[in-house]
């Protein structure tokens, strides 16, 4: 458990988040509070495209439910400000995000949080990974490009992550600035995960 954000992170920097979809579906993720008070998480857990992907994989033709409520921590309400641009290929049910911005920007009660690091991670760099379930040391590998160049590049974290840990923060192990947001397990390696890179987060926050 996070136990007050062990590992030197200020309390309240990393929070559990729950999304409700029309009262018929619920998803769990992690959110990271930024220094300006807003929160970042992984869009694919909190937006309508993620549910649509699940329906596609199940072969369902009925309309998927829509996001109806978000809450953080002990039931505090949250509001989705905006998401990265989702692309769902209905032929193979693959969900991707333009420029690798699997990001959701949220507003919720609370102040303070993490500052963004100045540069992307480098291969072999040690990092602190913080999710709703744990804080652990990890190590970065290289980068991986999506098959479609328009869908960007992700950094690779050599750590197995579980459901609910999407949206977790990847922090510089010493300075504790935010280097990335956990996106998903690596499709070809369940012992690794893809991370939204610092440069992508910076562009997303700037409105790009």
Image (cartoon, rainbow, N blue to C red):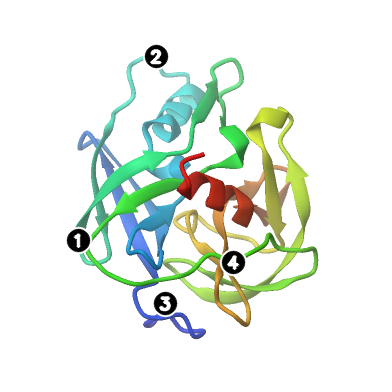
Farthest residue toward the front?
A: 206
Could you tell whether 191 is left or right of 44 in the image?
Answer: right
Among numbered discs 4 and 2, the one appearing first in the sequence: 2
Could you tell whether 123 is left or right of 89 in the image?
Answer: right
Nearer to me, 11 or 131: 11
Among numbered discs 2 and 3, the one appearing first in the sequence: 3
Contact? badges 4 and 1 (CB < 8 Å): no
Among numbered discs 4 and 1, the one appearing first in the sequence: 1
Q: Quadrant of the N terminus?
A: bottom left
User: Residue 68: x, y in percent?
Assistant: 22, 38
Mark identifier at residue 75: 1
Q: Residue at x 38, y 37 (%)?
A: 47
User: Residue 99: x, y in percent?
Assistant: 61, 37
Nearer to me, 37 or 26: 37
Helix, strand or loop status at disc 4: loop
Mark identifier at residue 155: none
Residue highlighted by disc 2: 61
Is 59 located above or below residue 113 in the figure? above
Specify few, some or many for label 2: CA neighbours under 10 Å numbering under 14, 14-19, or 20 or more: few
């Amino acid at each position: 458990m996070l136990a007050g954000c062990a590992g030197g992170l200020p309390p309240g920097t990393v929070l559990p988040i729950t999304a409700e979809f029309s009262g018929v579906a619920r998803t769990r993720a992690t959110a990271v509070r930024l220094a300006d008070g807003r929160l970042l998480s992984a869009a694919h857990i909190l937006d309508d495209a993620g549910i649509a992907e699940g329906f596609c994989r199940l072969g369902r033709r009925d309309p998927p439910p829509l996001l109806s409520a978000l809450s953080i921590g002990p039931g505090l309400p949250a509001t989705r400000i905006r998401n990265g641009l989702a692309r769902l290929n209905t032929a193979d049910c693959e969900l991707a995000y333009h420029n690798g911005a699997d990001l959701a920007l949220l507003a919720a009660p609370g102040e303070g949080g993490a500052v963004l690091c100045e540069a992307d991670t480098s291969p072999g760099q040690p990092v602190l990974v913080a999710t709703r379930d744990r804080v652990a040391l990890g190590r970065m590998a290289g980068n991986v490009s999506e098959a479609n160049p328009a869908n960007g590049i992700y950094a690779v974290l050599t750590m197995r992550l579980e459901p609910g840990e999407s949206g977790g923060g990847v922090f510089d192990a010493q300075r504790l600035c935010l280097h990335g947001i956990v996106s998903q397990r690596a499709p070809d390696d369940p012992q690794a995960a893809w991370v939204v890179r610092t440069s992508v987060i910076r562009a997303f926050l700037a409105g790009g």
